[in-house]
Amino acid sequence: MFPISDSVSSKKFPFVNLGLILLTCYVFYLQLNNPEAFTYSYALVPSSVRFTDYTTLIQFVTSIFLHGGWLHIISNMWFLWIFGDNVEGSLGHFWYLILYLASGVIGGLAQYLFMPDSNIPMLGASGAVAGALGAYFLLFPHHKIKTLLPILGFITFTNVSAYIMLGYWFVLQVFSGAMSIPGSRIDEGGVAFWAHVGGFVAGLIIGKIFARSEKVVLEGEVIG
């Protein structure tokens, strides 16, 4: 399932969400000019992390804005464009920014725990975007998502509730992450499924906290 659009417009102009997308695209442009040096300077290299040295922890943040290729950045920014604006509209600009960055850091930490000795750079906004998805899942479970759905070799479009689509996406990440553990090696790259899982859970929890602090009205629930 691939999302095309959601059914409800944001309550506010999502300038933070748009700013994050533009900033990420600009960083990707800089990365393309000097990919190896830029990547190793700002990506998260697990083996270089020292929790007693705060300078090595900055990469948990900077790595959020790097990407491994065109497909990587386009897919992340597409998901952020569709789901992030509604979350920002509900939580407010400041709390949405905090949720995005915190989810990215927590997602990176979740992936790090499974490969702390790896020399392979970890990079991408997937954990942060997953945080936006987790908050959307919490806040708007009944919103309809126009979805591209391949069935028996044919492409069709259908409306799916956010609860179904994002729930399916999360279960797929957990399953894929579990399947990757037995054959994982510290000298091999791949998809950071546990960053997705960690970011999504972080988005659920942080979204719930900020929703309560801001008295956000959830679908079917009044937060007091």
Image: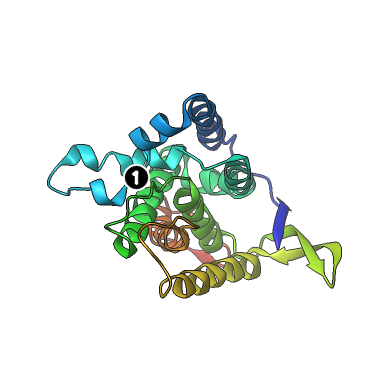
The answer to whether residue 118 is seen in the rendering is yes
> Image height check: is 110 above or below 8?
below
In the displayed image of the protein, which residue is found farthest to the front?
A: 187
Q: Residue at x 39, y 61 (%)?
A: 205
Q: Based on the displayed image, in which of its 4 quarters is residue 161 positioned?
A: bottom right
Apparent side of residue 52 relative to residue 194 in the rendered image (left or right): left
Residue ranking furthest to the left: 52
Residue 208 falls in image quadrant: bottom left
Position in image of residue 17 (x %, y %) = 54, 38
Please indicate, yes or no, whether residue 7 appears anywhere in the rendered image. Answer: no
Closest to the observer, 213 or 198 = 198
How many other residues sit within 10 Å of disc 1, few (<14), some (14-19) or many (≥20)? many
* The N terminus: image quadrant: bottom right
Residue 50 coordinates in the image, percent (x, y): 18, 48
> Residue at coordinates 59% horizontally, 42% vertically from top-left?
77
Residue hosting label 1: 44
> Which of these two is toward me, 78 or 92?
78
Which quarter of the image is occupied by the C terminus? bottom left
Q: Residue at x 45, y 44 (%)?
A: 96
What's the image's color scheme?
rainbow
Q: Please, what is the three-letter code of the amino acid marked with disc 1?
A: Leu
Position of 3 with respect to 133 (left or right) is right
Q: Nearer the viewer, residue 4 or 143?
A: 4
Check disc 1 and report its element: helix, strand or loop.
loop
Residue 30: x %, y % from top left = 49, 25
